[in-house]
Image (cartoon, helix red, strand yellow):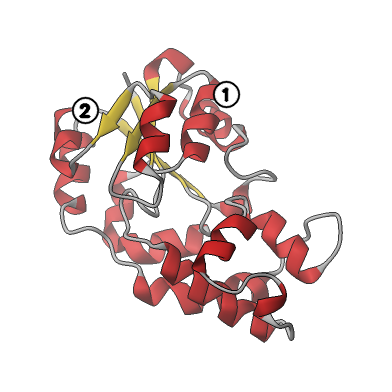
Amino acid sequence: MKLIIFDFDGVLRSGSWDIFYDAYKVLITAMGKNPESFFTDVVSFKKWTNVDWHKNEMRILGGDTYVPNSEFNRIFHDACDPHLKLFPWVPDLLAHLSKKYTLAILSSSTKASVEKELGELTQYFSFIIGAEDVRSLKPNPEGVRLILKLTNTDTSEALIIGDMNVDYLAGKSAGIKTALVVWGMGDREELQELKPDFLFEDSTELFNL
């Protein structure tokens, strides 16, 4: 294996459904609409939301075609990012793995949000692909294939590590190895049923890759 592709939120940075629920309420209100016309609580929000948030944006703003909206992104991340924190073990993990592998990030967050959180740790990544860098977000394999091309890596030599089924599906569709972590936002039983190549129960296991 030569390349490890990390999802960001839920894998290297903390996240929760409550945080995203609150951020979307702020966002929808700022767009001049009533959040309760879309969802009324966290449970209904989880059913309403799509991990490909381009589709959420189209549902909120209207229209059948995704058109990048920098103000939409800014409002969401201003509401959300202060509540998201890099896990304390991440610096040591990146320093360790970067000695053996090429590292990359494929995130549905914006590249700016990821890089701001990482700070000087961005040095460990050859490429960081954010939501603005692809037309279709995970589970579409576009981002995975882009990273494979940029790093000149064969599918047999790459691994994607995520916390939700969309990460698994993106990796599987691209033909690379898949790994899922249980400390993110995915449902543990659902992740187990997917039978990824690796299922990590604890962050310490990542150091053994």
Residue drawn 33% across and 48% down? 11
* Horizontal arrangement in the rendering, residue 39 relative to residue 89 (left or right): right
**Residue 69, located in which quarter of the rendered image?**
bottom right
Q: Is residue 91 visible?
A: yes
Mark 1, other Cα within 10 Å: few <14 / some 14–19 / many ≥20: some
Percent across and percent down for residue 141 are: 59, 32
Q: Is residue 117 above or below residue 106?
A: below
Q: Secondary structure at mark 1?
A: helix
**Residue 198, located in which quarter of the rendered image?**
top left
Q: Between residues 76 and 180, which one lies in front from this camera angle?
A: 180
Mark found first going from the N terminus, 1 or 2 = 2
Percent across and percent down for residue 194 are: 43, 27
Label 1, label 2: how far apart the Cα atoms are? 25 Å
Q: Is residue 133 above or below residue 169?
A: below
Percent across and percent down for residue 9 are: 40, 54
- Say what amino acid the circle numbered 1 marks: Ser
Residue drawn 52% across and 75% down? 23
* Horizontal arrangement in the rendering, residue 149 relative to residue 122 (left or right): right
Residue drawn 76% across and 63% down? 59
Q: Secondary structure at mark 2?
A: loop
Residue drawn 36% across and 74% down? 83
Q: Is residue 61 above or below residue 130?
A: below
Q: Is residue 154 visible?
A: no
* Horizontal arrangement in the rendering, residue 65 relative to residue 42 (left or right): right
State the quadrant of the N terminus. top left
Q: Which mark is residue 100?
A: 2
Residue named by callout 1: 173
State the quadrant of the C terminus. top left
Please identify, in this view, whether the residue under mark 1 or under mark 2 is nearer the observer.
Answer: 1
